[in-house]
Image (spheres, helix red, strand yellow):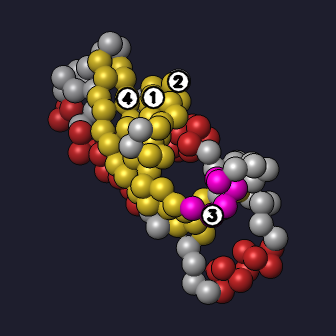
Amino acid sequence: MYQLKTEASFDSAHFLTDYYGKCENLHGHRWRLVVFIEADQLQEEGTMRDMVLDFGVFKKSVRALAEELDHTFLVEDGSLAPATIEALQGEGFSLTVLPFRTTAENLAAYVAQRLRTQGLPVCEVDCYETPNNCAIWKG
């Protein structure tokens, strides 16, 4: 088994709905993603012969997704009143509305799913919301 790993970071705000503690309030994180891909065998032909995948291709995909989430307000769909969403957008705020509660666990799974739809053989995503705390998704 062969594995590759790359990392990317992004800054974004969120809050947790139906949570009773500090995280129910709007706050931000410097999120760090550590993404692993794996293959039983190395590629046998072409420019990527003897590789799992070209690091440039891998890094570009992970960093593009991090860039998409960078400096946005991650919002669970249905957690804010439509008027609030409209007001924030009217003020020019960048919102990323997601169909799940914006926990590190769900963000790790979301990153894995998005990268898998691009054909990357993702086997693990570590999503750090602080330097000392991370959620891990394993395929």
| Residue 127 visible somewhere in the drawing | yes
* On screen, residue 123 above or below 92: above
Q: Earlier in the sequence, mark 2 or mark 3?
A: 3
Residue with the most extreme bottom position: 91
Please, what secondary structure does the residue beneath circle 3 have?
loop
Q: Which badge, 4 or 3, is on the more N-terminal residue?
A: 3
Q: How would you rate the neighbour count of disc 4 (Cα within 10 Å): few for under 14, some for 14-19, many for 20 or more?
A: many
Q: Label 2 belongs to which residue?
A: 139
Q: Name the residue: 23% across, 45% down.
A: 56
Q: Earlier in the sequence, mark 2 or mark 4?
A: 4
Q: Which amino acid does the dot numbered 2 rest on?
A: Gly
Q: Are marks 2 and 4 in contact (CB under 8 Å)?
A: no
Secondary element at tag 4: strand
Kindly report the distance in space between the C-alpha atoms of the residues bearing marks 4 and 3.
33 Å
Q: Amino acid at mark 1?
A: Glu
| Marking on residue 37 | 4
Q: Secondary structure at mark 2?
A: loop
Q: Disc 3 designates what residue?
A: 26
Q: Quadrant of residue 103?
A: top right
Q: Residue at x 53, y 24 (%)?
A: 139
Q: Residues within 10 Å of mark 1 (few under 14, many from 20)?
A: many
